[in-house]
Amino acid sequence: MRRASRGVGDDQGTARQNGVSAGRGGRGMEGDDDEVLCTAVDMQDDDNDPTRRREIRSKYRDLINSVQQNREDMLSPTNNKLTDVLEEANKLFAEVRQAREAALDAQLLVLATDLGKEKASQLHAEGSSFDPSAFAENLLSFMGLNRLEDEGEMSGGYLPQDAWQKVGNRAQCCFRTAPTFHYMLGSFLAEPPPPRQRIARQRNAPSKEAKRIMPTQLKKMEESHQEATEKEVERILGYLRSYFADDPNSPISYYEFVIDPFSFSRSVENIFHTSFLVRDGLARIYLDEHKLPCIAPIEEGEVEAGGGSTRQQCVISISPKTWKEIIEVFDITEPLIQASATQVDAGTVDPEPQHTD
């Protein structure tokens, strides 16, 4: 009953929000636009009026208190106070505009639902109330219970094997059931199929000629590269020993020795090859009185085999900008390590170097 009346209340509330009431529908359509605009503004002001909102919430609280205080009276079958409360709530619901008011309406609806449930349980169907014991006896009789057969062996009497199936068939007509599913081609086997044996695929083996040619080529390249490095290291060692023999008391600056003022790549190669001299114990790098690195060769008799002194290694990084700054600071005009003929042909250095300040 409340749901139907609430639908009417919602229609009325919608009509008021649109600015057209049921009693003034004809005049609203016959009037001009100013009357419709004024009506809409008035309704909007009424919805936002704090006094009206407080009045609605106060009426809801009065109804809730009334239901809670008169609970016993409302449970009486001859009392219609619950119906009166629902009708009053329907009238208030038509003016609900805010969440607080809707929450109070929901609270009242919960109380009314509980009272309705308790009141319905007290009703009598066809002049007699529901008796669970009598229902159980009727159900056992329907299932075919025979209390006389084998009464000495079973205290509860004899119940046929299809008793519950009989009850299920009787209750089946009261529910909508889906048709049973069956397989047209037999039942589905839930067991997984046996795993198949995977056969390893053999890769195509390289031919004998490829096996013979490729390693030989790589070996020749590695040997040629290693021989070139060893030759270049020996050549740089010859330059270092030559400069040191000319003036043993004058230290050789490390940067002046490895930096080529005409080629950055050649300077990097000199640093790389010189590192092998230090690693193999053929040269040493130390700091002079100005804390600048110097390099000097090591004679064969100075360090025994196995290395009596502790060696320390470090990583040197150099960039074209740093390379130019070193050239300017140390005033390097000519390379101490001359480029070999192979490097000149390869183009790593200029065949006719020209230094520009």
Image (cartoon, rainbow, N blue to C red):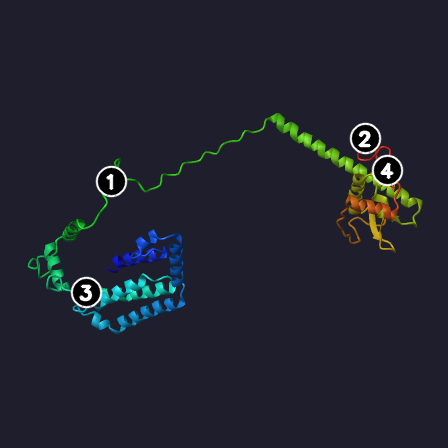
Q: Could you say where residue 61 lies in the image, as x and y percent from the top left?
A: 32, 70
Name the residue beneath numbered marker 3: 121
Q: Please determine whether, in this image, residue 216 is positioned above or below residue 248.
A: above
Kindly identify the residue that appears in the image at 23 percent across and 66 percent down. 84
User: Label 1 is placed on what type of residue?
Assistant: His
Residue 297 seen anywhere in this rendered image of the structure: no
Q: Label 4 to label 1, Cα distance in Å?
A: 95 Å
Q: Is residue 84 left or right of residue 297?
A: left
Which of the marked residues, 3 or 1, is nearer the chain's N terminus? 3
User: Label 2 is placed on what type of residue?
Assistant: Asp
Q: Which mark is residue 345?
A: 2
In contact (CB < 8 Å): disc 4 and disc 3: no
Q: Nearer the viewer, mark 2 or mark 1?
A: 1
Q: Please determine whether, in this image, residue 25 is positioned above or below residue 194.
A: below
Residue 345 seen anywhere in this rendered image of the structure: yes
Q: Nearer the viewer, mark 4 or mark 1?
A: 1
Q: Which mark is residue 338?
A: 4
Name the residue beneath numbered marker 1: 182
